[in-house]
């Protein structure tokens, strides 16, 4: 390495006194071992910071530049010169131009060849003889258009203030070592490459691009580009002006989107739409073609929109046009009668709007078929007439009330119920509360809550106070009137006679139930005696005919006894005489079947039981025994002769706090013609049945007393399935 030999010292002293010539001494490893003050200023580096440093470490982009080629040539003993060059990659320095000389430098002790790098600022001389250059550069910095100059490698030579602002840079130094490729979208870079090919032939170009600022924002710019040539006519870089057209592009994009949205709404609308210009149809949508029966727009284009009107509406639209021409105010929405291609007329609602396009004023006409609406209006009129007829009836009292429960209008029947005349009603402000005794106010509060929540009140009984102070039992219901704000209607029926009749009916039914119970109870003893005597007689007599007669007597008395037993069960159910206990289905169901088989001497069927309950279930055990007994008897009576009888019972929880019971058999099933009648009182499935017809009636009545339900269906493979649902929360009182 060349260090403090005489030649280098003398050269350093000589160049140090040269105020306009900068120099750098590099050894064979490209380490800096000397630099003068002029070079320090040019390269913006300090001598004490760079001595012994590799120049390629200080300027990483040097290896990719023409300067590095010149350095290597000088190391090989060949002098090189760049007559007009910028400071890239050493620095970014506005528009200054330099001359670089690279000379081989041999040390006295032959330790290796170094490089003497001489730098001359050519811009100083130009500025001295052309002071207008400074003014021109000042003007470029102050204009609103961005200016960007780059060399052939893509590194920046110059940026004005507007360009820095577009890129969100504080100064040109922010992009030192970066190429312009990093600030454009890929699509813009590809466009630039094709433009550069044109510029090599000295052809300026104009195109749009997408600029990426330092913070990631994308700007749409209009670029005017041109090549820059050196003194030898060689392209040494490019310069371009940049105009921010982001707002314009966004406006155009929004305008295009608006047009597309309008066209989509126009085309896809269910309403018939058309556009006319100079009162001639220019465009229609598919809904219009379909509604009016046309095949294509060609049948309508160029014609007046009145071609779609019924003759009776042409005069109406002409009067409207006259008003518009006279600048009179008209409604934008109105009704007309239209006629389709086949001459079929229909009412339509028309909405007309006007808008400006580039080629002049156009009209948008939207047509809605209101045939259904007109029919509905007619129906409403008919309904109003019917309601008016109902309002004037003498069968039911009707009253209208506002949101404050003030009664605002009543019919004659309502006045008759509360014993008011029409004049007396209008003399005072009457509220629902004025008619209600204190003991019924709580029920009215519940009714008001139901009305506010559901818009109606389920009919319920209460009492009204008449004008004379007497009370009358009534049945009342109410509903909110749709389309009429804060107004409801109440319907009132005088149930005095009905209540009296109901009380008498209940009294008769109660007396009849008591009689039947007493009669059944009184008959039970004698029947038991007759059955016992016939059994004794059959054992004592030997005459075959007598034994046959006694057997018939026994059979009839047992049937009568069974009917009395069922009748007493029905009376017990009707009288709500129940005792609730916890039910063990695993014990109860098999016992019922075993008892039934034992008492009736039936063949033992196959039996499957599956009980899956998560909580105890309480019910009347006697009633459940009766239900299972009747269902099992039904399965046995209608068993199939082709296979052994199978009875399946499943008991499980439901999703709403109840249980469900399935009783399934593989018997003959139920005739579809009678399946809806099998729960009727005294109904028997066929003529061969020896039952009383009360079994399934008892089952249904008992289940309904517990607010439960029962249904039946035939099974495809053969047999029937009864489905019972019982709630858990039955009142046990």
Image (cartoon, rainbow, N blue to C red):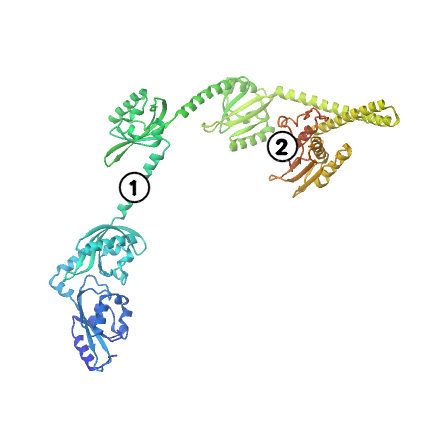
Query: Badge 2: few (under 14), some or many (20 or more) residues near its Cα, within 10 Å?
Result: many
Is residue 446 in view from this perspective? yes
Q: Is residue 2 above or below residue 281?
A: below
What is the quadrant of residue 8 in the picture? bottom left
What is the quadrant of residue 586 in the picture? top right
Which label is found at residue 714? 2
Q: Using residue 539 as the reference point, say whether residue 19 is left or right of it.
A: left
Q: Secondary structure at mark 1?
A: helix
What is the quadrant of residue 564 in the picture? top right
Q: At which x and y percent is residue 314?
A: 29, 22
Query: Spatial distance from mark 1 to mark 2, Cα to Cα?
Result: 66 Å
What quarter of the picture does the C terminus occupy?
Answer: top right
Kindly report which numbered mark, 1 or 2, lies closer to the viewer in this rendering.
Answer: 2
Is residue 146 in view from this perspective? no
Front in this rendered view, residue 80 or 604: 604
**CB atoms of marks 1 and 2 within 8 Å:** no
Q: Is residue 646 above or below residue 479?
A: below
What quarter of the picture does the N terminus occupy?
Answer: bottom left
Query: Badge 1: few (under 14), some or many (20 or more) residues near its Cα, within 10 Å?
Result: few
How many numbered tags mark residues here?
A: 2
According to the picture, the residue beneath numbered tag 1 turns out to be: 256
Front in this rendered view, residue 320 or 242: 242
Q: At which x and y percent is residue 486?
A: 47, 29
Which label is found at residue 668? none
Q: Which numbered disc flags the more N-terminal residue, 1 or 2? A: 1
Residue positioned most to the front? 642
Q: At which x and y percent is residue 385?
A: 46, 19
Q: Using residue 697 as the reference point, say whether residue 105 is left or right of it.
A: left
């Amino acid at each position: 390495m060349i260090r403090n030999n005489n030649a280098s010292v003398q050269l350093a002293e000589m160049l140090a006194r040269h105020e306009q010539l900068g120099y750098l001494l590099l050894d064979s490893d490209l380490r800096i071992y000397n630099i003068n003050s002029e070079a320090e200023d040019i390269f913006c580096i300090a001598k004490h910071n760079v001595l012994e440093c590799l120049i390629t470490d200080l300027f990483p982009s040097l290896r990719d530049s023409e300067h590095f080629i010149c350095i290597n040539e000088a190391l090989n003993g060949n002098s090189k010169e760049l007559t007009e060059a910028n400071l890239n990659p050493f620095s970014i320095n506005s528009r200054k131009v330099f001359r670089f000389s690279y000379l081989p430098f041999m040390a006295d002790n032959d330790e290796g060849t170094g490089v003497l790098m001489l730098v001359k600022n050519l811009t100083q001389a130009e500025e001295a003889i052309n002071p207008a250059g400074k003014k021109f550069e000042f003007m470029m910095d102050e204009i609103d258009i961005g200016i960007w100059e780059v060399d052939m490698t893509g590194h920046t030579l110059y940026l004005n203030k507007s360009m820095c602002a577009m890129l969100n840079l504080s100064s040109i130094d922010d992009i030192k070592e970066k190429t312009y490729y990093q600030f454009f979208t890929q699509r813009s870079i590809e466009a630039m490459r094709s433009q550069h090919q044109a510029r090599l032939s000295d052809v300026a170009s104009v195109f749009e691009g997408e600029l990426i600022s330092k913070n990631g924002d994308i700007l749409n710019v209009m670029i005017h580009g041109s090549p820059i040539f050196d003194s030898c006519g060689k392209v040494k870089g490019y310069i371009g002006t940049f105009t921010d057209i982001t707002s314009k592009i966004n406006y155009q994009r929004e305008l295009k989107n608006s047009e597309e949205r309008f066209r989509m709404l126009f085309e896809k609308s269910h309403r018939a739409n058309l556009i006319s210009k100079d009162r001639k149809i220019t465009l229609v949508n598919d809904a219009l073609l379909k509604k009016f029966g046309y095949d294509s727009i060609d049948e309508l284009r160029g014609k007046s929109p009145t071609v779609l009107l019924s003759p009776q509406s042409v005069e109406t639209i002409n009067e409207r046009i006259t008003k518009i021409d006279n600048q009179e105010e008209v409604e934008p929405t109105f009704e007309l009668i239209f006629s389709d291609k086949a001459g079929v007329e229909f009412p339509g609602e028309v909405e007309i709007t006007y808008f400006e396009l580039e080629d002049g004023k156009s009209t948008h006409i939207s047509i809605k078929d209101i045939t259904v609406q007109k029919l509905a209006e007619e129906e409403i009129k008919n309904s109003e007439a019917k309601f008016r007829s109902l309002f004037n009836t003498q069968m039911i009292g009707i009253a209208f009330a506002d949101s404050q429960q003030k009664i605002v209008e009543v019919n004659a029947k309502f006045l008759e119920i509360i014993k008011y005349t029409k004049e007396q009603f209008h003399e005072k402000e009457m509220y629902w509360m004025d008619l209600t005794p204190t003991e019924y106010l709580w029920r009215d509060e519940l009714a008001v809550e139901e009305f506010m929540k559901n818009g109606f009140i389920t009919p319920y009984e209460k009492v009204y106070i008449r004008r004379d102070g007497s009370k009358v039992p009534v049945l009342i219901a109410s509903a909110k009137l749709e389309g009429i704000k804060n107004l409801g209607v109440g319907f009132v029926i005088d149930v005095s006679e009905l209540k009296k009749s109901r009380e008498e009916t209940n009294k008769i039914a109660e007396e009849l139930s008591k009689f039947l119970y007493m009669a059944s109870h009184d008959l039970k003893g004698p029947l038991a005696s007759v059955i016992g005597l016939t059994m004794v007689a059959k054992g004592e007599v030997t005459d075959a005919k007598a034994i046959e007669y006694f057997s018939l007597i026994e059979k009839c008395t047992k049937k009568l006894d069974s009917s009395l037993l069922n009748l007493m069960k029905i009376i017990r159910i009707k009288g709500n005489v129940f005792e609730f206990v916890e039910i063990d289905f695993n014990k109860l169901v098999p016992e019922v079947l075993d008892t039934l088989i034992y008492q009736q001497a039936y063949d033992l069927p196959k039996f499957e039981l599956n009980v899956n309950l998560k909580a105890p279930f309480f019910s009347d055990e006697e009633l459940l025994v009766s239900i299972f007994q009747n269902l099992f008897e039904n399965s046995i009576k209608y068993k199939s002769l082709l296979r052994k009888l199978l009875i399946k019972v499943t008991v499980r929880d439901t999703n709403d706090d109840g249980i469900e019971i399935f009783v399934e058999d593989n018997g003959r099933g139920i005739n579809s013609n009678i399946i809806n009648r099998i729960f009727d009182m005294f109904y028997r499935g066929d003529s061969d049945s020896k039952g009383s017809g009360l079994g399934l009636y008892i089952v249904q009545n008992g289940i309904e007393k517990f607010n439960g339900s029962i249904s039946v269906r035939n099974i495809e493979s053969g047999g029937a399935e009864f489905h019972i649902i019982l709630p858990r929360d039955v009142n046990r009182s």
